[in-house]
Amino acid sequence: MEFKFTQDPLEKIPADVALVVVFGNEGEKSSPISLRQTDGGLGLDKLLKQALSKIIREQAFTGKEGETILLNTLSQIKPKYIVVAGLGTAKNFSTETLRRVGGKSVQIANKIRAGSLAVVLESGNMQGKNLDNRLQAFVEGALLANYQFNRFKTKNNTNKKNTFQTFWFKHPGNSARLKKVCEEAYATVEGVNLARDLTNLPPNILTPTALGREAQDLAKKYKNISAKVFSPAEIKKEKMGALLAVAQGAKEPPAFIHLKYTPPQKSKLKVALVGKGITFDSGGLNIKTREMELMKMDMGGAAAVLGVFKILGELKPKVAVEGFIPSCENMPAGNAYRPSDIITTRSGKTVEITNTDAEGRLALADALDFALESKPDYMIDMATLTGGAAYALGELVTPVLGNDKKLVSRLIQAGEKAGEPAWELPIVQEYKKGYSKTPADIKNSGSGTRASTISGAIFLEEFVKKNKWAHMDIASTAWADEPTSIHPMIGATGSPVRTIFYFLNDLA
Ligand code: BES
Ligand code: ZN
Ligand code: ZN
């Protein structure tokens, strides 16, 4: 990926596409919009003998967000095409608007096999958003939309590969600073893309062992990152009875991954990230009767931890971070754990297995208990924990629950900044009661409420003691069944990698 800066006007830039972004009109009536001087639109229109404004009128282009026009310039100017993209009303303008416009523009560029895109960077604030923030969002959206997962396509693949690879920015000012903004956005999206790749990989390839290798690769690549992968024998020695119970029906051995990021400067704060790493969730003996083929994504939390670590390695923020990933398959077999088994977790608490499909919380219980020993200031777990997350908040909003108001609200704020909305669900005390109706200390399902996302969090809370902790249930947001401007592909979204990185970066 290349980021080029120039003082030339759009018509002279040797890019395939010139991008003109326009605000829509306020109010109910949607009349065609007018082009502006500042973003180069008016200049192009003049050179093209008003072709641009004519098309805008003819097509009744009103500048709504998501609305675009594509125009071939017939060699009248350097760029072969012009894309006009609507921003929606100025009133509703946010960095998310630019993220989506960036995404949409790159999708169009790839569709017409364009390699480069030029846009004017206007100085000063735009609806209260400064240039750095606007550029960051635009580039982030564009790069997110340029993601592909095609390593298993064997035939005629080359002409389907994305063509986009160069940004051109017209800007009069200091380009060194802006280039840095672009490069940070690039590093961030590379982290998201690692998470997307890992989550999209099928379970016969991305085994717990392979996940461990990914962690070791990060440690090899980045000086500030170390990784230890616990073997099954070491997991036994750690007395992770819950993780081992889930893993016992699978031929694939489990793995427990411990990552450490040490910032260049001494840090006051340490954050523990814990990610559910079930590489395939068949449900176990409580076998799933629907959507089992989706359950390769049950390691989305683990993928997010690794994605965040990649960004930490690249951008080196000031906060100390440790990562913990309990990983295994959940399979039915003659030696699989059974409903009614009672197991002993690493913490010493006993759990009656009332549903083998509630396996994530078991694996996480041992990981949270292990993570406590590093004495983190904050503990955040990310897990594709409950199908109920989709009923609670749908496909676009991640439920966050926790025992620390400040932590939860910081995560929600970071999500807002990232364009990955999150919202708090309450930990309702009354829902705890059902969990103790068991001969063990607690059972792993059936707390007596239909709010499964809440009861999942209640179970986890039993293992975090008094530590400040938040849980993000990404069951419905780590995977997209509908393409959007920044996720053109159905599949892994890489959520909440950006949320967590922004949270960590702002904490430092
Ligand atoms: N991995 C699933 C949750 C899930 C469902 C993730 C759909 C993504 C999409 C989890 O292990 C599970 O099966 N949860 C059960 C818990 C129940 C048995 C208490 C659920 O949500 O139904
Ligand atoms: Zn399950
Ligand atoms: Zn699961």
Image: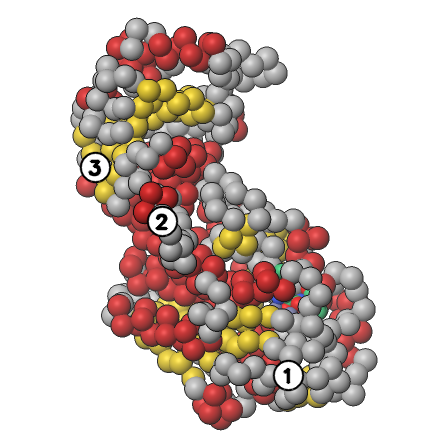
Amino acid found under the numbered disc labelled 2: Asn
Residue 486: x percent and y percent?
Answer: 45, 42
Residue position marked by numbered label 2 in the rendering: 157
Residue at which label 3 appears: 4
Residue at horizontal 58 percent and vertical 16 percent from the top: 27
The amino acid type, in three-letter code, at marker 3 is: Lys
Q: Which residue is mark 1?
A: 333
Q: Residue 21, relative to residue 136: is it above or below?
A: above
| Amino acid found under the numbered disc labelled 1 | Ala
Mark 2 lies on a secondary structure that is: loop
Q: Residues within 10 Å of mark 3 (few under 14, many from 20)?
A: few
**Which residue corresponds to the image point at 52% horizontal and 43% vertical from the top-left?**
483
* Disc 1/disc 3 C-alpha distance (Å): 57 Å
Q: Earlier in the sequence, mark 1 or mark 3?
A: 3
Q: Nearer the viewer, residue 33 or 48?
A: 48
Residue at image point 52% right, 67% down: 299
Quick one: label 2 or label 3, which is nearer the N terminus? 3
The answer to which of 205 and 467 lies nearer the viewer is 205
> Is 345 rendered above or below residue 508?
below
Measured as percent of width and height from the top left, residue 206 is found at 45, 69
Spatial CA span between label 1 and label 2: 39 Å
